[in-house]
Image (tube, grey):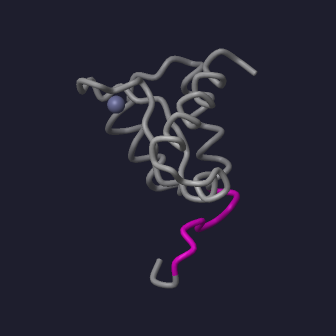
Amino acid sequence: MTPKQREQEAFTESYRQRSEIDAETLNIYLVALPCHCGQGGCAGWAMVSRNADSIRLHGELYAPDMTPEETAIWDAALKAAEGEGQPTRREDA
Ligand SMILES: [Zn+2]
């Protein structure tokens, strides 16, 4: 596991504790991605809906200047979401 992946895991766990969501639900719907939004309080990570469109949009809007290591994490998340098809398990999706 790379240092960035460890950061991602730590951010995910801290988010999970703050939001009192169980790990399984979180992993179905959300993924932690590198964030360069520049807003105060930004930890350098953001929780994003785990679907390809949201992951692409987040990258374009909030992290267009990712490092290669961050890009690898973003790319892995995108590939996983694409592989899952439409992970939002909603009838109206
Ligand atoms: Zn941010």
Q: Where's residue 76, x and y in %? A: 65, 39
Q: Is residue 91 magenta?
A: no
27 or 70, which is in the foreground? 27
Q: Quadrant of ligand 1?
A: top left
Residue 16 occupies which quadrant of the picture? Answer: top right
- Count of picture labels: 0
Occupied quadrant, residue 4: top right
Position above or below: 67 against 83: above
Q: Residue at x 39, y 47 (%)?
A: 57
Residue 53 drawn above or below residue 18: below
Q: Position of residue 22 (x, y in %)?
A: 61, 54
Residue drawn at 48 percent across, 54 percent down: 49
Farthest residue in the right direction?
A: 1
Question: In the rendered view, does 88 fall on the left or right side of 61?
Answer: right
- Residue range in magenta is 82-90
* 81 lies left or right of 38: right
User: Residue, x 64% and y 50% (percent of image)?
Assistant: 23
Q: Quadrant of the N terminus?
A: top right
Considering depth in this image, is 65 or 8 the residue closer to the camera?
Answer: 8
Residue 70 % position (x, y): 55, 24
Residue 7, x across and y down, in percent: 58, 22
Instruction: Using residue 78 as the reference point, say whether residue 59 is left or right of it.
Output: left
Q: Residue furthest bottom?
A: 91
Residue situated in front as seen by the camera: 4 or 12:
12
Predominant secondary structure, magenta span: loop
